Image (tube, rainbow, N blue to C red):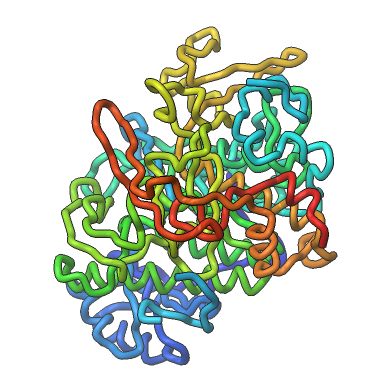
Amino acid sequence: MVAMAACSPGASQAPPRAATPQGPEYLVFYNQGGQQQAQQAVESAGGTTLANDAKLGYLTATGGGGRFAENVGADGSVVGVSPDRSIGFAEAGAARAATRRTGGAKGRTAAFPDARSFTKSGSGEPLAGRQWDMRMIGADRANAKVPGSRQVLVGVIDTGVDGKHPDIAPNFNRELSRNFVTDKPKDEDGETLDGPCEVSSCKDPVDEDDDGHGTHVASTIAAPINGIGIAGVAPGVQIVNIRAGQDSGFFFLKPSLDALTYAGDIGVDVVNMSYYVDPWLFNCTNNKADSRKQQLEQAAIITGMQRALDYARQRGVTLISALGNGSTDLGHPKVDKESPGYPVGEKKERQIDNSCVNVPAESAGVISVAGLGPSGRKAIYSDYGVEQADVSAPGGDALDGTGAKATRSILGAAPEHVLRAAGRIDAKGEPKGADVVKDCKGGTCAYYQYLDGTSMAAPHATGVAAILISRFGKPGKGGLELAPATVEDLLYKTATPKACPTPRQYVYKAYGQDVTQVCEGDQADNGFFGHGVVDAWKAATVEP
């Protein structure tokens, strides 16, 4: 297959690069007006500047020596330095090992911020009876009233989207979709990362997803009403694949920056970000457990992502993120045992506090979504926090009831080849367990899988945002436009308020153990449910 990642006219493009010397590459973020001084710092440290991104304020440079990042970071013009891990290479490798990466005080910021600043459903689709999530938020009724406009572009920043899936293809915009990731078969230590490349360039086509995560997300947002499988929250809008995740599930900084910039440049209305930026689950700029190089990398992630998020938001992109799956009170975090998650084997235990942030879930201007189980309770895995949880939505919770059941999770589209590789369907194409569902129409068959996570919650909110933009947006770049602040206000206005449980110290029962999580805040805004549970029906019927 031919890679389809060339930019169309008007799309975001990288600045011209100098000839690439040998050595690792870095992203060097400079402060306002600090480009030339930062370039001098790179040269003084024995490095070479390869490119400058004036939109987001960073240099791509190749390093000179083992302390390049520390030496450059000591310059007053530099606010963060991160290795650029986004470039893969062609090499035979072992079988792929896929993992799931989910995102996990908001407000506007100035330019160039840095780290310092089972019943019948209304859709009538064959598997609608399995979509308890759509009934919870009224999407089954909203589908008929406001399915969403094809002038609304929803960007899925994820592991890719299977654009050929029968329950995605009708709403998939192949022309605008882009892949900002190059597969990397092995990591720097020779361990399997993405596995063997499927194409000679190691850059997958824009309609491919070798993980399945992004395809599930996309179908929750906009699976069409077409007589097969399921229906999404907004089955009439268009999906744009803006891939930033590796096949292995890692999301590194540079592809995320490119994806957000591109979304802003082409007129995407809302993006879904069901991930956090690797390798740090929590980014701390001055943690004593980290080396200076690691501190600079975390500062670069905070700084670079905030600039990219601001760039997109200022161009009309509503930003929606998964809150995270660590069962953590993000307002009072204490320990991070998951960072750095890359390369494999580098994790360490760090004491952290509220100055350490999960990106993009805790970045400014982002609407972050907590996950709910079918009973309506906050899912046991979902992160929470009165400052961090903006809204809540169905994310699934297999443990929400007696025993564990896959059908308490969220049903979404799945690429057939991913299920085959994982051994979830047999040689005849039949599911091997209750977690996978097959549906056929007129000789065409499609597959679906049940998944849990705030990754699954966020696209419900994204779909509701798409309904609001369809109703209240005005003609503009890319189709319709509605200011992100207005979308946010309407999303909160149409959400159904939900108070903290009584008592606030909620005790979950999980495999014979008690897990207590404390909900803070009032009914209008609290740490478990935010401003409330998103409501597609209210979004479809609310008066302007």
Direction front: furthest residue: 502
Q: Is residue 25 above or below residue 424?
A: below
**In the image shown, does 65 or 108 lie closer to the viewer?**
108
Residue 226, quarter of the rendered image? top right
Taking the image as shown, residue 540 lies to the left or right of residue 41, namely: right
Q: How many marks?
A: 0
- In the rendered image, residue 235, in percent from the top left (x then y), is placed at 74, 39
Q: Which residue is at a point 48% across and 27% down the rendered structure image?
A: 418
Residue 513 % position (x, y): 24, 32
User: The C terminus is located in which quarter?
Assistant: bottom right
Residue at 69% x, 28% y: name it.
166
Depth check, front residue: 271 or 538: 538
Residue 88 seen by the camera: no
Residue drawn 47% across the image and 58% down it: 526
Q: Is residue 364 above or below residue 85?
A: below
Residue 281: image x %, image y %?
32, 56
Query: In the picture shown, does residue 166 fall above or below 16?
Result: above
Q: Is residue 271 visible?
A: yes
Residue 327 placed where, x, y %? Answer: 34, 46
**Quarter location, residue 391:** bottom right
Quadrant that contains the N terminus:
top right
In the depicted view, which residue is nearer to us: 237 or 342? 237
Q: Is residue 247 left or right of residue 486?
A: left
For residue 156, side relative to residue 78 (left or right): right
Residue at x 38%, y 60% (from the top left corner)? 358
Q: Is residue 271 left or right of residue 386?
A: right
